[in-house]
Amino acid sequence: MNILFQRCHMLLLAPLLLAAAPPQSIPPTPAGPSWTDLADLTLSSPVILRATVTDVTRLGRKQAPDVPQDQVRALLQADVQAVIAAPAVLPARIEWLWQAAPDPRGRPAIARNSSVLIFAAPVPGRAEQLRLVAPNAQLPWTPESDAAIRAVLAEARDPAVAGLRVTGISDAFHAAGTVNGESESQFFITTGAAPLTLVLLRRAGAQPALRVATGELVDDSAAPVRPRTLLWRALACGLPTSLPARLASEPALVADWSAIRDSLGPCGRTSVR
């Protein structure tokens, strides 16, 4: 036990680790992360692992004097079960610092043999040591989360999709149809790269239908926006809640913009990026 204590003490005093791998405080998330939270973590993490915790060593106030009174810090060691993403070969056993609210007994609220997902970055020069990329970057492993992460990584192979960010609305127009109750509105969205066009179609007796087209021309390739995709994430999280003043003077455009927002639904992001 003394050997382990000394090892932890030396780990905390190493300037490289303190500078490159600050401990992360993980707030309780009883409902689990949203799909958007998982996508955010996936896209910002060079290392994503599934691991089984083998050892949890709580660090006392002497070793971790900056920890808030309502939290504890621990050195976690784990065996790697699966490498979902990594820039290089990793050792079979890894370790990292973790900080969170304690359990009712005042101990780190994680048990040995827990299966966890780690979103991390390697500590330069220390192959076995990682740092969490965000306060919510250690999560319980579930098959659903694992599948969602792998789907995001597959979609992100297209750089244009992975880096898509809405920057504004350049223009819009509304056209009434020849049949009462039918209309079409088009909103031209800037992204910093290729533009997008959102099309809101209204047909008598049907719910408004949202379509999206890449580029400035709208043709038969315009398709619905599938939820839990990076395109959906960019739109749901990035579109402004209201139109620019120069477009907001047209009631039909305002109504159709509201319908687009309703069609996309809430972004679901709960963590600070």
Image (spheres, rainbow, N blue to C red):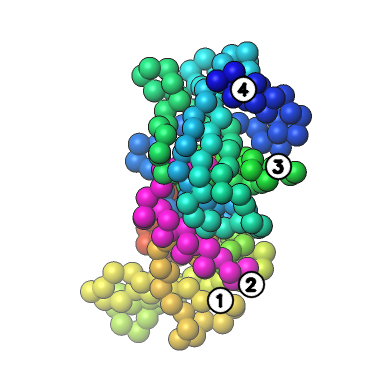
Q: Position of residue 128 (x, y in %)?
A: 64, 43
Q: Quadrant of the N terminus?
A: top right
Residue at horizontal 45%, vertical 25%?
108
The reply to whether residue 14 is in sight is yes
Mark 4 element type: helix
The label nearer to you, 3 versus 1, is: 3
Q: How far apart, in angstroms, are the residues tagged by discs 4 and 2?
A: 57 Å
Q: How far apart, in angstroms, are the residues tagged by discs 1 and 2?
A: 7 Å
Q: Report which residue position mark 2 lands on.
A: 194
The kind of residue tagged 3 is: Arg
Q: Position of residue 79 (x, y in %)?
A: 50, 45
- Marks 2 and 3, the one that precedes in the sequence: 3
The reply to whether residue 119 is in sight is no
The reply to whether the C-beta atoms of the residues labelled 2 and 3 are less than 8 Å apart is no
Q: Report which residue position mark 3 lands on.
A: 126
Mark 3 element type: strand
The label nearer to you, 3 versus 4, is: 4
- Marks 4 and 2, the one that precedes in the sequence: 4
Q: Position of residue 165 (x, y in %)?
A: 60, 60
The kind of residue tagged 2 is: Ala
Examine the residues drawn in magenta and state their main secondary structure: helix
Residue 88, quarter of picture = bottom right
Q: Answer few, some or many: residues within 10 Å of disc 2's Cα (few below 14, many 20 plus, some between 14 and 19).
A: few
Question: Magenta stretch?
Answer: 137-160
The reply to whether the C-beta atoms of the residues labelled 4 and 2 are less than 8 Å apart is no
Q: Quadrant of the C terminus?
A: top right
Q: Verify whether residue 144 appears in magenta.
A: yes
Q: Position of residue 100 (x, y in %)?
A: 49, 28
Q: How far apart, in angstroms, are the residues tagged by discs 2 and 3?
A: 40 Å
